[in-house]
Amino acid sequence: MSENQKGKTMISRVTALLLLLASGIAMSQGTLEVQTTVQKEAVTTNEDGERIKELIPAETVVPGERVVYTITFRNTGEEPADDVIITNPISEELTYVQGSAFGPGMELQFSVDGQSFGAAEDLTVEEDGETRTATPEDYTHIRWVMQSDLSAGAQGTVRFSAQLN
């Protein structure tokens, strides 16, 4: 197999992986509809020569490129949804871009094991028998915990970026 074919195979595998990971997990005491979009950052130049960043579909991603996950959720029930929690895994092939996660009205949490969650600055990992502060490379999941009820028919959006290793 040529180097070009190997590269194309890797890109196809990564694209398939991104599509598989494009589903956030939502929990609440109501009915939520969740949709995840995966895009990548592209830089274009406008007529004035200014470089503009835009998001385009992540059909093909190569190492070093950033992908942006946008998770949109909507309460499809007739009652307010309480305890809304959106959890999204981060693939081993991706590294979370520090400071990129946001969600209005949400508490942001991270995990290094997929089981326990907390503020980024509170996470630790064991390495070579030593405990150290977790870094974005260690994060396995991101969680958004809504701080209020989500009214019937209302929707929200959360987002984060990751870089392909």
Image (spheres, rainbow, N blue to C red):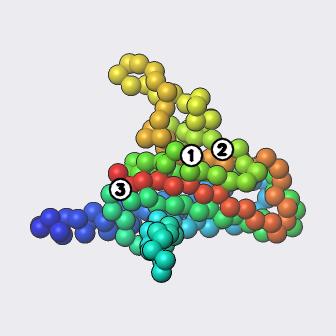
Q: Which quadrant holds residue 24?
A: bottom right
SS at mark 1? loop
Give the percent coordinates (x, y) of residue 21. Answer: 48, 59
Q: Which residue is mark 3?
A: 64
Q: For the N terminus, which image quadrant? A: bottom left
| Circle number at residue 108 | 2
The quarter of the displayed image where residue 115 is located: top right
| Image quadrant in which you'd find residue 13 | bottom left
* Foreground pick, 147 / 53: 53
> Which residue is rendered at x = 81% and y = 58% of the image?
150
Residue that protrudes farthest toward the left in the picture? 1
Disc 3/disc 1 C-alpha distance (Å): 17 Å
- Specify the amino acid type for callout 3: Gly
Cα separation, mark 2 vs mark 3, equals 25 Å
Give the Cα distance between marks 1 and 2. 11 Å
Q: Residue at x 46, y 60 (%)?
A: 67
Mark 2 or mark 3, which has the lower sequence index? 3
Position of 10 relative to 133 (above/below)? below
Tag 2 or tag 1, which sits nearer the N-term?
Answer: 1
Q: Which mark is residue 99?
A: 1
